[in-house]
Amino acid sequence: MTGAASGIGRRIAEFYAREGAIVGVADLDAGAAERAARELEAAGGRASAHRMDVTSEAEVDAGIDAYAERWGGVDILVSNAGIQHLDTIADVSFADWKRVLAVHLDGSFLTTRAALRRMIGGKRGGSIILMGSVHSYFASVKKGPYVVAKHGLLGLCRTIAKEGAPHGVRANAICPGVVRTPLIERQLPVLAREAGVSEEQIVHDLFLRLTVDGEYTTEADLAEVAVFLAAFPTNALTGQSISVSHGMHML
């Protein structure tokens, strides 16, 4: 599981460990990954830590190979690592554009490819879960690279579903609404300052305006869906995007 040392990834890791999964905590921050793995084990789970830059082919392959060799294979991949950058298309630098797409798209491709090879070789199927967003369906200003990346993940998910089906590998995308993560916390003061309003106004007038109840999606909500998708037994549920958004987007 990438980006698993904090935030949404950490909560999914906790839920998986509680269900008996052996969790590979992959994160760019090696120290945070080690701490998270130790805490999962202290709570009664089984886990291993893997320092991983998801934009590095070598690090991704090495990390997934290390997990598979230690624990006997790979059954589930959650590709969760992500970053954000706020800028208009007219102003965003090519370097920032490439950096956002690299983490989301290259990272999901590289981790998926490495996990798929293990799943196919192990001949016992598996479940690949990509982390999309409500921005997989619509756009927001100043989030161009993120929007493009999240749209692209749905295409990747559907392709994996087609190619994985003969091998018993399912692929689905979880598409969260607004989750109050550190990513959101960093955006709030910037957006509030630019709009000349309070942070609370940004929350209610921008972030949560389209929800049915004015509520954030929680990390626990997403973890419950991740458990469900990982455990679903057949290809009846594959190639799908699940919007977990308090009704921000309804299919």
Image (cartoon, helix red, strand yellow):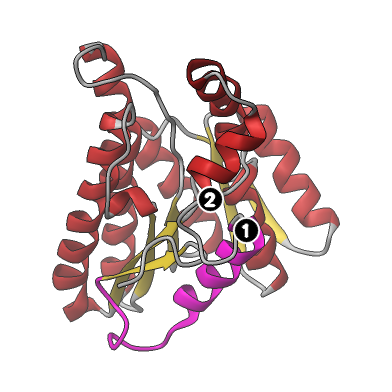
The magenta-colored residue range is 217-239
Tell me where residue 159 appears, x and y as whole percent: 15, 63
Query: SS at mark 1?
Result: loop
Tell me where residue 210 appears, x and y as whole percent: 45, 56
**Mark 2 sits on what residue?**
208
Q: Answer with left or right where residue 136 lies relative to residue 191.
A: left
Tell me where residue 161 appears, x and y as whole percent: 21, 70
Q: Is residue 238 magenta?
A: yes
Quadrant of the image occupied by residue 204: top right
Name which residue lies at 59% across and 65% down.
Answer: 213
Query: SS at mark 2?
Result: loop
Q: Earlier in the sequence, mark 2 or mark 1?
A: 2
Q: Residues within 10 Å of mark 2 (few under 14, many from 20)?
A: many
Name which residue lies at 28% across and 85% down.
Answer: 235
Residue type highlighted by circle 2: Leu
Tell me where residue 23 appears, x and y as whole percent: 60, 58
Name which residue lies at 51% across and 24% down.
Answer: 191
**Mark 1 sits on what residue?**
215
Q: Answer with left or right where residue 168 lies relative to residue 204.
A: left
The answer to the question of whether label 2 and label 1 lie on touching residues, with beta carbons closer than 8 A, is yes
Q: Answer with left or right where residue 31 lies relative to residue 166.
A: right
Quadrant of the image occupied by residue 58: top left
Looking at the image, the residue that sits furthest to the right is 42
Numbered tag placed on residue 135 in the rendering: none
Marks 2 and 1, Cα distance to the nearest angstrom?
7 Å
Residue 112 shows in the view: yes
| Relative vertical location of residue 10 with respect to residue 146 in this rendering, above or below | below
Name which residue lies at 19% across and 15% down.
Answer: 90
